[in-house]
Amino acid sequence: MEQDQPRLSSNTPALASAIAPQITHEAEEEGISLGEILATLMEYKWLIASITLAALIIGLAFTFVSKPVYRADGLLQVEEKSSGVGSLKALQPLLGDDTTVSAEVEILGSRMVLGRVVEKLKLDLIATPKTFPLIGGTIARRYAGEEPNTPLLGLSSYAWGGEVIQVDSLDVPRPYLDQQLILTLGEAGAFSIADKDDEVVLKGTVGTRASSNGFSVFIAQIKARPDTRFRLTKLSAESAIADIRNKYAVKERGKKSGVLELSLIGPDAKQIELVLDEIQNVYVRQNVERRSAEAEKTLKFLDAQLPALKVQVDAAEAAYNNYRQSRGSLDLSLETQGVLKSVVEVEDAAVKLKQEREELRQRFTSEHPTVQAVDAKLARLNDRRKQFDGEVSRLPETQQTVLRLARDVEVSTKLYTELLNTAQQLKVSKAGTVGDVRVIDSAAVARQPIGAKPLAILSIAILLGLVVSLITIWLLRTLRVVVEDPETIEAQLGLPVYATVPHSKSELALDRRLKKGEGTGELLAVKFPEDDAVESLRSLRTTLHFALLDAQQNSLLITGSSPGLGKSFISKNLGAVLAQLGKRVVIIDADMRRGHINKEFGLPRAMGVSEFVTGQATLENIIKPTSVPNLYVVTTGQIPPNPSELLMHSRFEELLKQLSEQFDNLIVDAPPILAVSDAAIIGRHVGATLMVARAGKHPIRELEQAVKRMNQAGVQVKGFVFNDLNTDRQRYRYGYKGYVYRYSYKN
């Protein structure tokens, strides 16, 4: 063998800077460039596509299974209180203040109104067919046949469309309120009802009332297949009202317009129209009843006062006539007549205020502002009355007596007449009460469902998918602190990166063929010599050729920090490109635990390293030629129980020495250093050690620990081979310092 062949050396201190040139772009390190963002998106394009597609599928499923929701609306007008008789406007102080619009809104949502609607329409009784989860309801809604639909997959207990149930009444014990019961239809109209524990609580027949143990039900009609199940629920009044309130809204249309807009949503268009219409009717009826009740209350008050006033009128007239008869004919002077008129006006006003205060005291306390306002008016009238009393005291005694008696007659007669007229007007008003609210628009349902349209739902789903995918990418990038470019290794570890091997789709195809047993012995360097990864290995070959001319040893150890880095790929293809120069190259598979290079060359595992070390084979027996000229392989041999002890044997060192004498280059493929110590054992017997790092595979701390482990064993790692770099990603990055260019063959 020629002795002037280039040999691998373990001492190459000055070559790191020449092999991995340093190109700095400090400005780019200050922030994230648009190219970096684009590169990240391209790296995770399949993740983005997958998440977005999943979101789109979910959106389609939601569009398919979701129930359509309809909206019914109506309008009410709250008018100012009016009795219908113009003269009755004077009664407003007796009938109370106008009800505000906000108060009417609260009344529309009260239990008084909604409770009557629930009772009238039996909204506390829910009876629906039991459909298959998720898709059953959709299938049932889309079925338009007259007879019950044929069950899918033989699931006859579920309703699949066309089923009808009419329950006229349902009574359950109090503990079973708001609990779902299951009705199972039998043959000939028979049925059974079970509770949540599947215990039958009631049996009966359609068209006949059934009662037992506090349960009572009358089912007027069922159209379904035997064995079909239905859900029955008796709601409490509170639950039924709360269910309406959750779908019901009242608001004033326009500020101080007095027009109220009512709306109700639900999946059943006919049902919500009926419910909203009934709410309007109940509200109008209660308003009329309330107005009639107020008039009745006031009328009762007046009827109680009129007899007493009649007695006062008669007594005052009798006293006045008797006095005039006893004194003869007496005429009031002009001054006395003026005083009488003023006194009568004051007394009349005072009596009316007292009547009003008495009415108010039936509804409010004495501290109420309205009552206090009436009291203030009475106080002012009393002051005026005292002034008139002073004027009267200056009159002659006879005039004073006549004035007093005439005053009693005038005041009593006037008050009695006014109250009598009021009572008659109230009777007329009570008979024709129409209330102060009216329906402007009856309940009506829009033809199209409300809510988002299918196209909008799908658009939102796609948008959410993109947002979720971007958040996922951000989380992955934040949580995954891994080495993605060789510069990180050089900066953090101070070791050169001798070669950057790009990702190879062709190698993936060869691996798939190998797993199928179709591509045995196919190497990327031979099958696809123009591949970028092969060209990177040629660069590594060139580096080793010129950098290690003074080598004392011709053996090279290739290892890594952890499994799955592609060290075997580097070993076999580097051996192939070295052999293509006419060098005799041997690859030694020293991974005594999981070595598989023999499979990739289509060679048997037996008769390898383990047989030579144990003395079962000679050197000539273990050297196996490959399909590549000048390239040979030494397999692991039989997997030993003690790999580390085997590699520490002197015969292994002898093996390397003999092979070094027969071959120009030795490439030893060793197991990962962080998994086992085999690489450290082998590294003491080779000329140089290279470690393989894979892009995006491990954090820098892992590589640092691997180098430290090798140094502790007395093995110096000369540098790294950066494997599986995504060149498409680097193509989008701006400011990447280790550029990878493609320069393909062209005829």
Image (cartoon, rainbow, N blue to C red):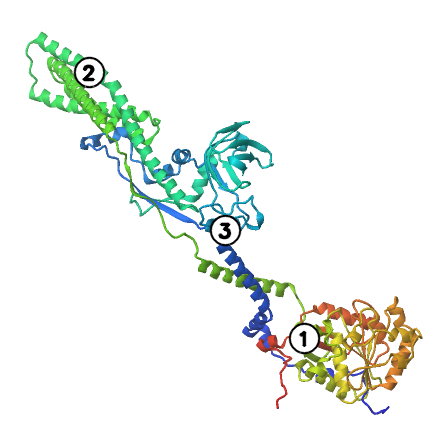
Residue underneath mark 1: 509
Classify mark 1: helix, strand or loop. Answer: helix
Q: Amino acid at mark 2?
A: Lys
Residue underneath mark 3: 139
Q: Nearer the viewer, residue 184 or 628?
A: 184
Task: Tell me the crowding category of disc 2: few under 14, some 14 to 19, or many 20 or more residues within 10 angstroms, Cα based.
Answer: some
Label 2 to label 3, Cα distance in Å? 79 Å
Label 3 to label 1, Cα distance in Å? 46 Å
Please give left or right for residue 91 compared with residue 39 in the image: left
State the residue at coordinates (50%, 52%).
Answer: 65
Q: Earlier in the sequence, mark 2 or mark 1?
A: 2
Depicted 732 relative to depicted 4: above or below: above
Task: Where is residue 90? Give x, y as percent.
Answer: 21, 30
Residue 310: which disc? Answer: 2
Task: Where is residue 156? Give x, y as percent.
Answer: 56, 45
Mark 2 vs mark 3: in front: 3
Depicted 682 relative to depicted 430: above or below: below
Please give left or right for residue 278 compared with residue 402 in the image: right
